[in-house]
Amino acid sequence: MIFQMYTEGNEGVLLGVQGIADKLTAMNVLSYGDKVESVGKKRGTGVWTPGQVYPILKRETYIGVWWAYQWKMVKDPLTRRKHRVKRPRNEWVGIPVPAIISEATWKAAQLRLAEGRQMSKRNNSRHQYLMARRMTCAHCGYRIQGRPCWTKGKVYLYYHCNGKCRSITDGKCDLPSYPVEAVDNLIWQWVRDLFQDMEKMDQGLEQIQQNTEGKCKALYARLEAIDKLREDNTRRDDMLLDLYLDKAISKEKLQARREQYEKADAELLAEREDILKQIDHTKLTDQQIRTIKQLAAVIGPGLEKADLDFALRQQFIRELRVTAKLAVEDGERIIYVQCIIPDSETRLSIDSATS
Ligand SMILES: [Zn+2]
């Protein structure tokens, strides 16, 4: 049905991805997320978005091929975390499955999708959003989206909260729009200030590193203490058993005491695990700091170049993992920006900063 709407139209009207989403919502068709409980949903039951329609149109499973081995897990050498990446297409393995639609219909849909992609490519290169896909709304939690807005033949770029989109939420979010240029400039200036003053940043990182070292030491000390307490408990338990075997205490007393020890031991064990986790986390921070120091050495000299080069700026923003939350406080539009540097969150106001 979705393919038909996309390639042949619905009641004589050729529908786009958004149109199909609206139509499915109007028809109250249940999506995959409505049927499976484990899928986290922000939207109401039966509400469709373009993001759900689009993958359906692209899926080859419907013409009888299911591609296995599309993804693999790789370890990031910097963070040592595993993440999923798409394999090159020639590594995929096609598995035949029953076809639901004809190949011709599928091809027609792909052709239309390719045309759409061409369009959006043109649009994207014309409208540059430094912080696209890197911001969320502090009021409703939805993503912030960059969108052009035409007024009297001129185009203005704005960041909008997705929660304002009428097809997604019932309760509209009241976050105002933020001009892209002001937001991007403010955030870029923040990154620049942060990384330009290398000496200051080195000092800051040094301080964090010392703090984590101190914290680690304290955690190891507590770990040692816990292990000693647990040993003491085991020894006392053994002594208790000896007393019982010597008939110095009753079986009831032995059991009551043993229960006490076991309970104490379980608590100590839980704390031990918690501390191990904290140590892991602290060590990770330490690793991050080393990564940042390496980055800073490379980035420092490149910043001025990036002032003139949007792609380079975007790369820095990505590598430094700059993200932001938008909020309105006392009538002022506020940006909470942070990056890879621990505790880097900063409150910026676009209303007082723009001159
Ligand atoms: Zn919002």
Image (spheres, rainbow, N blue to C red):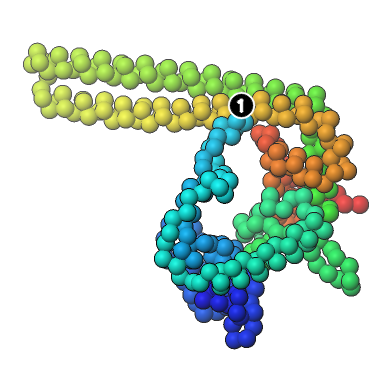
Q: Is residue 110 above or below residue 349?
A: below
* Residue 302 % position (x, y): 83, 33
User: Which residue lies at the image location 38% right of the left edge and 31% below the top edge?
Assistant: 270
The x and y percentages for residue 298 are 77, 29
Residue reaching furthest to the right: 355
How many numbered marks appear? 1
Query: Does 167 appear above or below 33?
Result: below
Looking at this rendering, what residue extends furthest in the left direction? Answer: 247
Q: Secondary structure at mark 1?
A: helix
Mark yes or no: residue 11 visible.
yes
Above or below: residue 36 compared with residue 238 = below
Q: Residue at x 14, y 15 (%)?
A: 243
**Spot occupied by residue 183 in the image (x, y as percentages of width and height):** 80, 52
355 with respect to 349 (left or right):
right
Q: Is residue 86 visible?
A: no
Asked which quadrant contains residue 315, the reply is top right
Front-most of residues 137 and 314: 314
Q: Residue furthest bottom?
A: 11
Amino acid tagged 1: Gln
194 left or right of 13 in image: right
Residue under numbered circle 1: 287
Residue at 72%, 53% in the rendered image = 132
Q: Is residue 322 left or right of residue 239?
A: right
Q: Residue at x 62, y 58 (%)?
A: 142
Q: Nearer the viewer, residue 242 or 64?
A: 64
Q: Give the x, y percent position of residue 282.
A: 56, 27
| Rendering quadrant holding ligand 1 | bottom right
User: Callout 1 environment at 10 Å: few (<14), some (14 to 19), or many (20+)?
Assistant: some
